[in-house]
Amino acid sequence: MFLPPEYFWLEPVIVAAIVVFVIDLIGNTLAFGSRVVNAFVTAVVFALVFGSLVYFGYGNISMTVSATPSASAPANR
């Protein structure tokens, strides 16, 4: 982690933006003739890369929800 704890949510966004940028460069390289073909190739390459990242468990983000309020939580009236 290269960000402070309060900005931890931003790290996966930055990583995803970099991945999408690289995938778009690959899509542009493979199909530079037409915009529609380029968009389709980029979407297919993204689906393959994103699917493999999810399948192999990279980028797990876990969140916990507490049913009981903490002692410092404000009271609802």
Image: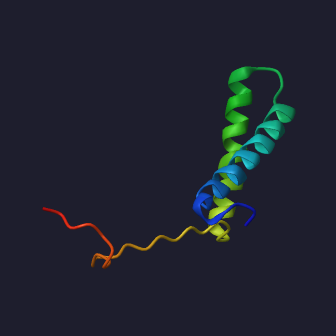
Give the quadrant of the N terminus.
bottom right
Q: Nearer the viewer, residue 6 or 51?
A: 6
Residue found at the far top of this picture: 34
As drawn, 64 above or below 22: below
Give the quadrant of the C terminus.
bottom left
Q: Residue at x 67, y 63 (%)?
A: 4
Judge from the rendering whether residue 31 lies leftward or rightward of residue 45; answer left or right. right
Tell me the quarter of the picture where residue 3 sits: bottom right
Q: Nearer the viewer, residue 13 or 42?
A: 13
Q: Nearer the viewer, residue 7 or 60?
A: 7
Residue found at the far right of this picture: 29
As drawn, 34 above or below 55: above
As drawn, 3 above or below 38: below
Judge from the rendering whether residue 55 lies leftward or rightward of residue 71; answer left or right. right
Q: Position of residue 27 (x, y in %)?
A: 79, 36
Judge from the rendering whether residue 18 lies leftward or rightward of residue 77; answer left or right. right
Q: Residue at x 64, y 51 (%)?
A: 13
Judge from the rendering whether residue 25 lies leftward or rightward of residue 11; answer left or right. right
Q: Residue at x 67, y 33 (%)?
A: 40
What kind of colouring is applied to the model shown?
A: rainbow
Q: Position of residue 54 (x, y in %)?
A: 62, 64
Q: Position of residue 34 (x, y in %)?
A: 76, 20
Tell me the quarter of the picture where residue 30 sits: top right
As drawn, 7 above or below 73: above
Number of labels in the image equals: 0
Q: Residue at x 76, y 37 (%)?
A: 24
Q: Position of residue 11 (x, y in %)?
A: 67, 57
